[in-house]
Amino acid sequence: MTITTVDGLVSAMGNNSSRIVIDKASIANAAAGQFHSLWRATGQPGQGAIPGAAVSCDNTLLGAIQFTQQTAPATSYLGILEGLCANAGSTLEVHDRLAHMGGLNGTLTTAQTVGLDLNAILASDNLDARKGDANFSDVQWWLEWYTDTGGTAVTATVNVTYNDGTSGNLTGISLAATRRASFMQPLNNLIPAADSGKYIRDVNTVTLSATTGAAGSFGVTATRYRAALYKPLANVRFTADWAGLGLPEIPNESCLFCIQLAGATSTGIVRTTGKIVHG
Amino acid sequence: MLEVGQLVRVLPPFAESFPGEYEITEVIHHEDGQIAYVLGELGGFAPIYVEAVA
């Protein structure tokens, strides 16, 4: 059964929840106003591995926030987050990491195969439920950096397949010199006007306009946003309760991890706790 | 071999995003032998992705 009353929520908060702890070291070389993955940040949960070929992600991966799996019809919700950051003006977003791939090379100018096709792996790791809307509109797509690429600014063109089965190139995105490890480049906002109203279900290839000068390592990641905690002041604990979070459902096998919208030139030490409630 | 100051067009798959003509502002010779033609704020483009404007 799902939680449908405030009484049920209060009971679950007190008696049927999984305590979560997010305690992550700061990542250097960030930039204010840009998204940075904490997947590779050390601390708790542990440092996630750099992916290879395209695969779905689940709660058992190192790097995922752990919570007790439920037996249907019981399910889980994010009930509260409270935490701080060493830097002011940062926002901690909690995402379900649906699938990822890595190993893209910053020196290749040919089309590099990505092959991250959510539609083809919906039967894996409860992805059909975790992805949200059937038209893939809840899925956010990113280029994610694992090690720095080189100092030459280049343009990336990403070829995708949309929810209606048609394929095309996203608008080219200029990548500044020396994209740093942990940087996350959102892709959804690059859907061109000609494909307005469509949603990405598959990333096929990434093509760089020139070598950046260093191979580095980057990849493509698909996530579903679940909630966020805004931390306007440094080293001050802020709280977002169930109403502020929107009580987002956390389906079984969700691979929860954090993305920091940085407010400074590092992500800052992040210390957050919370509860995933069950019922 | 193109030179700084030459006008070029950007070729597919980048042409849709960057139609028109651009001036080469810098030529970068990387250690691995690859060349990048820098088109101002657009950044670098490999020789296979640009053509000189006649």
Image (cartoon, helix red, strand yellow):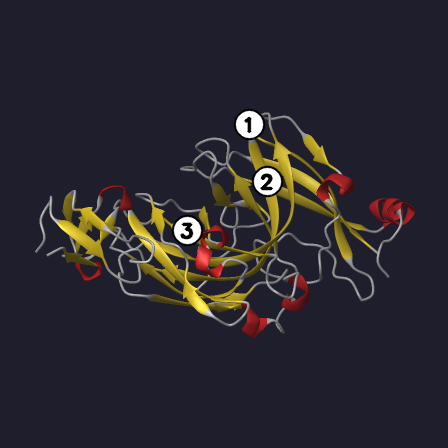
Position of residue A228 in the picture relative to residue A14 (left or right): left
* Residue wearing tag 2: A92
The image quadrant of residue A109 is bottom left
Residue A69: where, in percent of width, then height? Answer: 74, 61
Q: How far from the left and from the top, in percent, is residue A65?
A: 64, 52
Name the chain letter of the residue that bears numbered label 3.
A
Left or right: residue A267 compared with residue A159: right
Q: CA distance from mark 2 to mark 1?
A: 12 Å
Q: Which residue is at the front of the view, A167 or B19?
A: B19
Q: Earlier in the sequence, mark 1 or mark 3?
A: 1
For mark 2, name the chain.
Answer: A
Q: Amino acid at mark 1?
A: Ala
Residue assigned mark 3: A145
Q: Please tell me the numbered disc located at residue A88.
A: 1
The amino acid on which the numbered mark 2 sits, given as a three-letter code, is Leu
Question: Within 10 angstroms of label 2, few (less than 14), some, or many (20 or more) residues?
Answer: many
